[in-house]
Amino acid sequence: MPLVHMGDMLGHAYRNGYAVGAFDLVSLDFLEAIMSAAERCRAPVVLSLAESHFDYFDFELVMPAVEAAADRASVPVAIHLDHGASLESAVHGINLGCNGVMVDASLEPFDQNVARTRRVVDMAHSCGVPVEGELGYVAGVEGEDAERHPGEVIYTSVEDASAYVERTGVDFLAVSIGTVHGRMKTRPDLDFERLEAINAALQLPLVIHGGTGLSDEQFRRLVAAGVAKINYYTALSDAAAARIADNVASGARGGYTALVKSVQAAISNEVERCIRLWGSADRADALLDECRPWQPVEHLIIYNVGDAGADYVEAMMTEGHEVLGAIPGVRRVFTGEAVQHETGYRYCWLVRFAHPAVIDSYREHPAHRAFADKLFRPVAADRISIDYRAAGVPGAARGVAAESAKTFNR
Ligand code: 13P
């Protein structure tokens, strides 16, 4: 249950004057460290997965662990794709379990940034997923020396920000006001006047990237000016590396586990420091009361195929896995055959949707329509189709079927 709507989460932070930490994770040590700090502080948290880090871990392999961590949490959690480059990245992230996505087209000219972001927003909103866009450019690379990848900071202009939000429909905006991704030798100068003007014009949760290296006072001023999410990674990576270096220096023996001993604690302490500084500690319970839980829907069809043969059914199922599994918001496609045939219906589809919004967008999606019209409906007139959300699960919201669910043959 503690997976919540990220829009509700950041809306709560924005209205109540604090920022939620979005901590990029690159391993299970990071995941456990972030979650234990959030639990200690009773704080909401964003588990953030940056596309630029996908060279270091297998996104598909890590996501089930991230979801499991969110599932067993007692504090509100959102799972966010950080710096997704394209529409395909966003679909992939949502279909693997992200319930918030960032599209980063910030290096593109304004109109191209708007166009790409708009496409992602249309797709993501049809899955119930909120979107973070970026305008202006925050230079640098997470986890590296900022000076090695200086790029050119492009500041966000107030006028462009208003036009961008209106034309794209983004839910949160990452702004560039002088922060840089990565490790810096000096503190950056931040343009707070610009931030305040953007906040006054937009009145929507703002996001700061490049959190590492800012002073306590700079963080306080960011939060006071409408920043509801702060992205943070390099300092966590450095805390982990420093602990490994200490272990080596103190003659650690025993291979890998000896070298990474207490790495989680080092990361977790830094996460806790940030959570307390950004004001999100002790917000979990109020937020859980006010946020909608994020709940998947199981789309169940049980059916018979009349005279169609087993080969036809198998080919249809194989194609269904490929075609339906690629539709935005589809988390999983299961096809099955009844173990006992006398039960009435011989075959089933069980398609997991990320969110109830997918019930409609899936039904109307051209790939679904083509598949259903061409292969499925002609043979499966005898069928029952129902959309379910979880009920009777400890901690899950009560309810039998999704609001828009109907029992009908179609
Ligand atoms: P830092 O690595 O500078 O903390 O920035 C993280 C970030 O912005 C991730 O999107």
Image: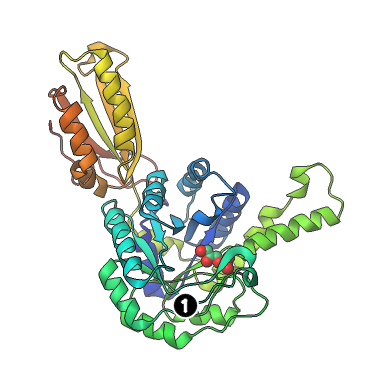
> What residue is rendered at 52% in x and 83% in y?
190
Q: Looking at the picture, how far across and down is residue 392, in whole percent?
A: 33, 39
Residue 130 or residue 389, whichever sits in front: 130
Query: Dot 1: within a 10 Å radius of its alpha carbon, few (fewer than 14), some, or many (20 or more) residues?
Result: some
- Res 149 quadrant in image: bottom right
x, y percent for residue 330: 32, 41
**175 and 75: which one is in front?**
175
Q: Residue 121, image x and y in percent?
A: 30, 59
Find ligand 1 in the image and state its quadrant.
Answer: bottom right
Instruction: Identify the residue position indicated by label 1 in the image.
Output: 154
The percent coordinates of residue 4 (x first, y second) are 38, 55
Residue at 41% across, 60% down:
102
Q: Quadrant of residue 238?
A: bottom right
Q: Is residue 101 visible?
A: yes
Residue at 30 percent across and 72 percent down: it is: 165
Quadrant where the C terminus sits is: top left
